[in-house]
Image: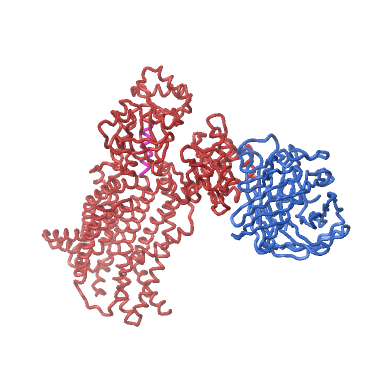
Amino acid sequence: MRRLGWTLATLLSHWRRHPTQFATLMIGLIAATALWSGVQAINAQARQSYDRAAAAFGGGRLAMLVPARDETLPQALFAKLRRAGWPVSPVLEGRIATSGVSLRLIGVEPLTLPRAAGPAPALELGIGAADLAAFLLPPGRTLVAPATLRELAAREGDTPALGDGMRLPPLAVQADLVPGTALVDIGVAQRLLDRPGQISRLLVGADDDGPRAPLAEVAGDTLRLIPPGSESDLERLTDSFHVNLTAFGLLSFVVGLFIVYSAIGLAFEQRLPTMRAMRACGVSARGLTAALLVELVGAALAAGVVGCIAGYLIAALLLPDVALSLRGLYGAEVPGELALRPAWWFAGIGMSVAGALAAAAHSLIKAQNLPLIATAHPYAWRTAQQRWLIWQGAAALALAGAALGILAVGDGLVAGFALLAAIMLAAALALPLLLALALHLGARGANTMLTRWAFADSRQQLSGLSLALMALLLALAVNIGVGTMVKSFETSFAGWLDQRLASEIYIRAADDAQARAITAFVATRPEVTAVLPTPRAETRIKGGPVEVLGFADHPTYRDHWPLITATPTLWDDLRDGRALLMSEQLARRLGLAAGDSLRLVTPAGALMLQVGGIYPDYGNPKGQIGLSNDVLFAHWRDAPDTRFSLRLAPDAVPALVAALRRRFALDPAHLIDQAALKRDSMTIFNRTFAVTASLNAFTLGVAAVALLTSLLTLGASRLPQLAPLWAMGVTRRRLAALDLAKTMALALATALAAIPLGLLVAWCLLAVVNVKAFGWRLPFHVFPGQLVQLIAVALAAALLAAALPTLRLSRMKPADLIRVFANER
Amino acid sequence: MNAEMSRRALLRLAALALAGGASSPLRAQGYAGLGQDAAGFARVVPGVALTFPRDHGPHPDFRIEWWYLTANLDGDDKAAYGVQWTLFRQAAMPGPQRDGFDSQQVWMAHAAATSATAHRFAERFARGGVGQAGVEATPFHAFIDAWEMRAGAGADANTLAPLTVSAAAKDFAYTLNLAATRPLVLQGEAGYSRKSDRGQASYYYSQPYFTAEGNLSLDGRRVAVRGQAWLDREWSSQPLAADQNGWDWFSLHLSDDVKLMLFRLRHADGRHFHSGNWIDRDGSHPLSPDSIALTPAAISRVAGRDIPTAWQVAVPARGLSIETAPLNAQSYMATRFPYWEGPIRFRGTHEGQGYLEMTGY
């Protein structure tokens, strides 16, 4: 034990003499842990919210009975099932709007609500008797999350007005509710949603509380049983989003480990003499390894804690963006406050330790097998480097082969990311080889002594710098890839919006009567050239939610509607009820192409239709199909006829919008013109990649840190190479300039190499990952301006990283340079 | 004060416990709601003739009401069993009856099955107005979920027999067929049961003369059973005095002819209030409070509490001196309002069996 202490103290003394190297190690570990755990915190937070949202739904933990055909169930069925021994509890759900905020209204029956139902058990656990009585008895209570109360700009006890003269029961805060949700008694919900005697679904409680009659005997075929643990829609829809985040977190982690690996490797090399001396003094190989392990784990633990704290800060910083993205994309509500569980801390610190051990494995094995006496090998580094380059080249080739294999046979989002990982790792491993080759060629062309020395020195430096350069390459490539994807997206999305939103004004009336009044009114306006009903309904195909759009037979659609593929007679077939339109996502999910047939189950029976055309439907997590208005109304008889769009000359739009607003008191949720709608859509889409862009910036930052720390550690160890030159008359300023030029040249070469890699990454993202993650494929565009900009950023990062070591070199005391000759070797 | 008082308190407390969770009975009794008067609810007044079958049904204008059955049974395996089936109704607010989920009626039920080694229980809650729970007078039918008490063919409103009672839960289930030839027993003054000098009273009748036979499953073991059962029916609107700590209540089958109901109400100041009713072929004979002696004889550790599960019971005026012992000392109802309720046996001047209910320990 004592010996271990002394060994450890001796090893640790190295860090005291090389504080920057220690900082490098810690920064690497902290950066790796921070980004990884930050992303994990965000994912965990979001999943928890879905879980709670789903629990209010009844999905997830509880089995559920849902209507097999209709939208709702008669409440009599609830009593009938209870009497037959089924421990069911009714839920009625709908949407309401108050104070300009749209809320999900959930009506529950607290006396029968199963304990595992989610936020509602708080009714029996958290709040007192008086509160339950208040919830049950008139006027009742509306339970909302604190965030919802703020959004409503209301206080507890307020009774916000709904559109139709009704009011919500007094508001009360229930901290663990999902934001955007209002929880009321089911009787209240039936009144507010105007669904007397109706329920949306039945939650099924514990399945061991007495015998039950067979379901079919009680309810015939009116109900469908959904077993517990089924993924909620929200979970499934957002899954790809979180895989995306996780991939970025992992990338940052790997980049961080690059730093750790280089720091540990360097420290090991520098401590070789010390370790040999200790071994000679009687420290066993095992004791030495143990001391190294203790040192490493200690550092990893400390860095893990700091990394987790930094991760928390990053998560807190990113969460608003994530919340916006999730809300914009999926309508998923994620509260802005982070709640962390102990498991998260353990996972973060565990990742730090595991990462440190993985990065140090090579050095630890070397320490275990350290020969006591090594003969001097002046060119040892070069033979070692060559062997090392060959190995890396082989690994790069193997990975490239793996990438091709994945591309050929892989399927799914994970395969898409595996493809990306293989491509990037292959490129990173090949980078030193390419740079060595370039330097070799450059050295041949060099004509002065100094430049030849510079090339040779660069090659010698390569093994020390290559990890940082690899990190830079990866960060740049990802940046180019993601940047290209986002830009491509914007370009095609803007064009798509123009086609999709061909009508000038979109209206959603409050009810049929208002719809009739509005239609009658616009009929009197000569500037309106067409009124196109755009009804909507919802259905499910193969278990997933699908929107049903109604199409009028009008040139607006025939001429403008964006299509990917279509049969030649699409629009006539659609009009005549022979065909349907299908969104790209849904077509991919179902594996259908234009010309295939689909059996569509509707409330009025099944329909056999041809897929007449497939259209892009960017940003919609749900599937979508289009039918002629006649077919839609014939099969969804209770679909409200309250949505329509108007065609008119663009310059007449403001006047008509103003007139409609005045006459029918339509708010922007019910009346919107094309320009505003496009603006809103673009906003949502820009948010989609807000998080991606932020993480991107973080990754680039980590790469810059990697470069900086590598240069700092190298700076100290390269004195023996520089001192002779100085002694031969090269000024320090010249030496520094030369060093800077070398670093910048390497960075530039790396950045140039990153361009083709980045474009390849972009292609992977657009053609593979996006298709799997979101279900749409975007056209691939190259944006040269953006590439130039990124190279500039990379060089700036390199310059910034090289500035400090360069400055140090140019100001180095001659005494330090001379000392090299005194005590080196 | 007498037994129905305790039942009412139980209901009241349980209904509050339903909302309040695991508040202790002591605190629950001091709960503010108990001090309210019956304003808005129908009042219990003397001179109202109970009529059957109408009064077997619910009285929604009154605040509280229950259908309470206990049975002492012998299995074909020679073992003794006990069964409880209880349905409570409470109106959460006075006024016109409201429909559907807006109904102010709240229903709660407890069921239990007890053997010498096992005590299994379950509870159910329901809102009125939607058909999940309720009581119909003709033909008599009381139900909550799949638990029910249903009159058989040719049922007689004056005996409330024949009657089938059933309940099933996770680890027990039973179906009992009840028969009776004696008419219902009207408690107090022709069913008007006075509780205090301050005007508190309830309408109260019983059927202590049921014979029972049927099936019982306990922890997956099924036995045929037969024995005796006792039904209490009561409704009222008045709340309970706030200074009581709990009660100890006995229903005893002294013989096929003679039944005895006794209880003591434990007051905070130690002045326990005793009450009882001797029921025989001639009808009911209220006992004077000082003629009843109830003394705990043994304390058991039940659910982390000390509960007197064995008693010395004496009514010298009737020549009764017995010692009771529980069939299962662990007959604890760990429902949202917890209490002890289980079958007991007694010996001494009389021998037989009955039920004991104890709250507030």
* Residue nearer the viewer, B205 or A682: B205
Q: Colour of chain B?
A: blue
The residue range painted magenta reads A676-688
Q: Residue at x 23, y 60 (%)?
A: A396
Would you say the magenta stretch is mainly helix, strand or loop? helix
Q: Is residue B80 left or right of residue A256?
A: right
Q: Quadrant of residue B272?
A: bottom right
Q: Residue furthest front?
A: B154
Quadrant the C terminus of chain A occupies: bottom left
Residue B267 visible in the snapshot: no
Q: Residue at x 75, y 57 (%)?
A: B354
* Residue nearer the viewer, A660 or A282: A660
Q: Name the colouring of the figure.
A: by chain
Q: Is residue A508 above or below residue B283?
A: above
Name the spot of residue A91 as percent of width and height, x first. 54, 42
Name the spot of residue A301 as percent of width and height, x first. 42, 65
* Residue nearer the viewer, B297 or B180: B180
Q: Quadrant of residue B301?
A: bottom right
Q: Residue at x 26, y 64 (%)?
A: A464
Q: Quadrant of residue B346?
A: bottom right
The chain that appears red in the image is A
Q: Is residue A687 magenta?
A: yes
Name the spot of residue B150 as percent of width and height, x first. 67, 45
Q: Is residue A134 left or right of residue A632?
A: right
* Residue nearer the viewer, B305 or B210: B210
